[in-house]
Amino acid sequence: MPVFSLDSGYSIGDFGKSAYEFVDFLCLCGQKVWQILPLTKTGYSNSPYSSVYSRSFNPLFISLELLSKKGLIKKSELKELKCKSERVDYGKVYKIKTALLKVCFSRFNKQDEEFNKFLKGKEYFNYAIFSAISEKSGYAPFTTWEKGLKERDSKAINSFYKQNKNLVDFHAFTQFIAKKQWLELKEYANSKGIKILGDIPIYVSFDSVDVWQNPELFLLDENLNACAVAGVPPDYFCQDGQLWGNPVYAYSNHAKDNYKWWKARVKHALTVYDLVRIDHFRAFDRFYKINANEQTARNGVWVEGPKREIINAFSFAKNKIVAEDLGMIDDGVRELLKYSGYPGMKVLSFAYDGDKNNLHLPELALDNSVMYTGTHDNDTLMGLLNSLDCGAKERLKQGVKSSAKRLKVKVNLSTNKSITNSLITLALKSKSKLSIIPMQDYLALDQNYRVNRPGTADCGNWSIIISKKLLTSKKAKEIKRITELNGR
């Protein structure tokens, strides 16, 4: 369940009341893990996999309702954000919420001891400076800034800070509040026996603090523009491939200090989450590189990644990492996954293509894996079933019957909803050490509740809100029952 999908009543999910209520709902369901999408601040695409800073928190997730209890905002001032929409309108939310957060900051005690300790620690100083310069420049990319700021000259940075201290401190304030609210929510979840499974996007945005602060770690030219960008070749999701646009890493430079930046990134993630999924794990074996001037991902090339070296650098986190090993997987990726010892992912939406050796089949799943009915990049189960023609649906039903027989469970395939419930049963009954079910599948929601359509833009990605009215005590009992009946 993505945080933005929580029904806060304030136009976007946040770290407030609705999040605590969702944790309570998970307890009633008998669940032990809540998987979320990255919490980082996003850019224009609103994708959590394209972050402004890999360690940031999205200020849009700050609960203004919680801040109202501290006297920083009046409830009457929140009426513009009050909304019962089924989708996040990011343009509207960003404009209104940023303005309200500035009101909160204007009323905040700048002498607050905890806040000043946070500022002195400078963990988010570069983020705050970057965000303030970006705002003052009309959100122009950092490569267009004046030379001193673009190249992080200390005199230019200090001069900017002195002239814009209040704005810089405001952006630090948003991280201070968001981090505090999130860690309090995480502590509450942990106290209820629920672990948070977070997500580390493999790449960062080009126009980001990470690239601005560490240009030597990316393939850039002398003007700091990207020479090459990331993506994937044509596949199941998109016939032109996916042109993500993120700069690719200069891994030879990462190796010089034993992957210090990457280690720090994973260590930080483990202070924010209990467990982490590394997105696009295959890029550690080989990654797809596309010239920056290409319009599609068709003409990219595969380049060798850091392989075992980077896995060795993550030795401190071995039992806390899940590898997203989906997409174009070859022997190199399989060998690296085996070497790492990380559990990979199995997805039932990919299982029933008629191949009896399909490794996503629940009866073939090994213990060291995580079983999903679908991910944020898949249609919901109901959406998938609605889209299948008669022949494809019959193949799926026959496959489900075969899996059920081998796993010794009963299934009902009379309706799309009963097939959905049967697939959930198979996911739970598999040998995988962990089974993750998207909330949309437990609620049997259709294609209108899909989170993301890879390779597309401006079509409502990352915006769905799930009404809290659907999260009833009756539904919780159903989820708990199916969980326990299948040995989870």
Image (spheres, rainbow, N blue to C red):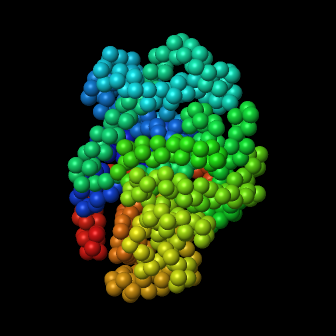
Residue 471: x and y, percent? 30, 56
Q: Is residue 355 left or right of residue 141?
A: left
Image-quadrant location for residue 431? bottom left
Q: Who's the residue at 22% across and 49% down the image?
A: 191
Q: Is residue 417 visible?
A: no
Residue 74: x and y, percent? 31, 24
Q: Is residue 134 left or right of residue 487?
A: right
User: In the image shown, does 326 or 59 lie closer to the viewer?
Assistant: 326
Q: Who's the residue at 56% across and 37% down the image?
A: 210
Total of numbered circles in the picture? 0
Q: Who's the residue at 48% across and 26% down the image?
A: 125
Q: Is residue 256 visible?
A: yes
Q: Relative to 150, does residue 166 appear above or below in the rendering?
A: above
Q: Relative to 59, does residue 231 appear above or below in the rendering?
A: below
User: In the image shown, does 303 or 446 lie closer to the viewer?
Assistant: 303
Quarter holding the C terminus is: bottom left
User: In the image shown, does 65 or 75 lie closer to the viewer?
Assistant: 65
Residue 36: x and y, percent? 41, 52
Quarter holding the N terminus is: bottom left
Residue 276: x and y, percent? 42, 53
Q: Who's the residue at 29% across and 39% down the image?
A: 184
